[in-house]
Amino acid sequence: MRPVVTVAEDERGVPSPRSGLGDASADGQVVLRDPTPVELVWMEELRIHLRAPDVDITTTADLSRLFDTYCTAWHERADGERWNPDYVITALGVALGDVLVARGREHCGGARWMVAAGQTGATTVAVRNDPFRRTIFPVDAVARRWITAETDWVAGFVEATDTPAQRLSR
């Protein structure tokens, strides 16, 4: 069963952080809200971790190369020599989300960062594209591919998240 996503809106139809986790029911609903200033700073700290003189984390090619490098290095190590990849996975997920937000704004003007909160109180960042009613979870996408050591997937994923209308607008 796919989770149902509910965007809390105020009287103007703008997503609002007023909704609480109590709105999420046992059927797997997820409540979306705008990121807080603290969450935005945390996301920027994650981006800083990935920045380097020869890396442009706003391009799918560099982001793909960066993921492949980190993921391959991690999987090549013996179990006892591996570092905890959570921070890198989350940083790569935020960078992937930035690419999706930029593409969504370029092609339809409606993509933005949101925070998804589930019934257990767990949160993750998400990219919401209201004109096309799509919500994408980039950190989860990175984590799933990291676990399976899938490489060279970023460009295909970004392309697959485009809606038909976005593809026509190019």
Image (tube, grey):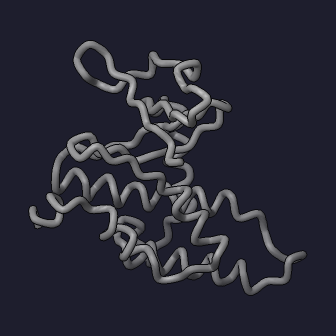
Q: Residue at x 34, y 58 (%)?
A: 100
Residue 20 horizontal/vertical position (percent)? 53, 19
Q: Nearer the viewer, residue 64 or 14?
A: 14
Residue occupying the far top of the picture: 11
Name above or below for residue 50 compared with residue 22.
below
Q: Is residue 118 left or right of residue 126?
A: right
Q: Is residue 121 left or right of residue 30?
A: right
In the image, 115: left or right of 76?
A: left
Q: Residue at x 35, y 60 (%)?
A: 99
Q: Is residue 89 shown above or below 38?
A: below
Compare residues 118 and 74 and report the one nearer the observer: 118
Task: Kindly indicate the quadrant of the structure image that contains residue 11.
Answer: top left
Q: Which residue is found at the position 39% from the left and 42% from the top?
A: 113
Residue 17: % across, % down: 44, 22
- Position of residue 165 in the picture relative to residue 67 (left or right): left
Q: Nearer the viewer, residue 2 or 31?
A: 2
In the image, farthest residue toward the left: 169
State the image coordinates of residue 143 (x, y, percent, origin top left). Answer: 60, 63
